[in-house]
Image: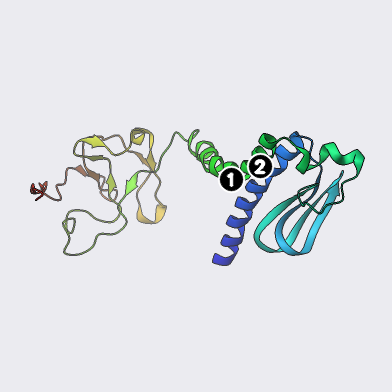
């Protein structure tokens, strides 16, 4: 499975990257000969118009093959205006830079798509407590942190709801307490817990 996840992740990044090159090349009228996701032998593909779209065997990159990109390309007179080499310099720069810029903007866009419309957030839940640590005996797995030093751990925590299975006999309940540090989900008890005293770093001079 890790190998599959890696292939999917790299495939998405390569697709977004090559999409940036392709869109701007088409926009400026460059003839795109081939778009490949991956290298090596062709696995599958199709042709649409003058461009061939393929998926290749080695999923570690990709490329957009444009007319005139290679100095040794044979460019017909009628296709001279659609050659990458005959574009103005700034247009060539836009096509080249579009790929990396798409990789930069894609995570930002994905972040807003995933989180912008989410008005219910999962509360901060304690997973495990290590022995002989400040939280040992004070926090337990399943406790929900609602506030730290009197400040809510999440602004939208009032709308968060804790869903629990019917096996432990605890029903769904709204987390409305904003002043406590933790809420014990098993007993429904809400209380404040102090873990450590504030530590002041000693001042040091430089000689």
Colouring mode (rainbow / by chain / secondary structure / one colour): rainbow
The residue depicted at 38 percent of the width and 40 percent of the height is 161
What mark, if any, has residue 31 been given in the picture? none
- On the rendered structure, is 70 left or right of 97? right
Under circle 2, the secondary element is helix
Residue 25 seen from this side: yes
Residue 187 position, x and y percent, is 25, 49
Mark 2 and mark 1 residues within 8 Å of each other at the beta carbon: yes
**Mark number displayed over residue 20:** 2
- Residue that mark 1 sits on: 100
**In the displayed structure image, the side of residue 106 where residue 169 appears, left or right:** left
What distance separates the C-alpha of mark 2 from that of mark 1? 8 Å
Front one among 133 and 74? 74
Bin the neighbour count of mark 1 within 10 Å (Cα to Cα): few under 14, some 14-19, many 20 and up. some
Q: Position of residue 29 (x, y in %)?
A: 79, 35
Q: Work out whether residue 197 or residue 64 is closer to the camera in this orientation and state it.
A: 64
Q: Which residue is more in the foreground, 72 or 175? A: 72
Q: Could you tell whether 111 is left or right of 35 in the image? A: left
Q: Secondary structure at mark 1?
A: helix
Q: Residue at x 76, y 43 (%)?
A: 85
- Residue 157 picture location, percent across and down: 34, 36
User: In this rendering, does residue 1 appear at all?
Assistant: no
Q: Is residue 121 above or below residue 41?
A: above
Q: Is residue 90 above or below residue 144?
A: above
């Amino acid at each position: 499975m890790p190998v599959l996840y890696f292939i999917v992740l790299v495939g998405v990044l390569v697709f977004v990257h090559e999409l940036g090159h392709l869109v701007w090349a088409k926009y400026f009228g460059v003839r795109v000969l081939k778009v490949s996701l991956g290298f090596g032998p062709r696995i599958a593909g199709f042709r649409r118009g003058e461009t061939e779209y393929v998926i290749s065997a080695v999923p570690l990159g990709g490329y957009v093959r444009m007319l005139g990109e290679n100095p040794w390309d044979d460019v017909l007179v009628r296709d001279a205006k659609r050659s990458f080499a005959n574009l103005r310099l700034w247009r060539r720069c836009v096509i080249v830079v579009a790929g990396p810029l798409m990789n930069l903007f894609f995570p930002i866009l994905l972040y807003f798509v995933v989180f912008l419309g989410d008005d219910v957030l999962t509360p901060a839940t304690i997973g495990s407590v290590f022995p002989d640590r400040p939280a040992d005996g004070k926090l337990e797995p399943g406790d929900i942190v609602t506030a730290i030093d009197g400040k809510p751990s999440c602004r939208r925590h009032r709308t968060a709801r804790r869903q629990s299975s019917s096996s432990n006999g605890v029903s769904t309940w709204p987390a409305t307490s904003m002043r406590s540090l933790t809420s014990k989900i098993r007993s429904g008890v809400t209380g404040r817990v102090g873990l450590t005293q504030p530590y002041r770093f000693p001042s040091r001079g430089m000689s």
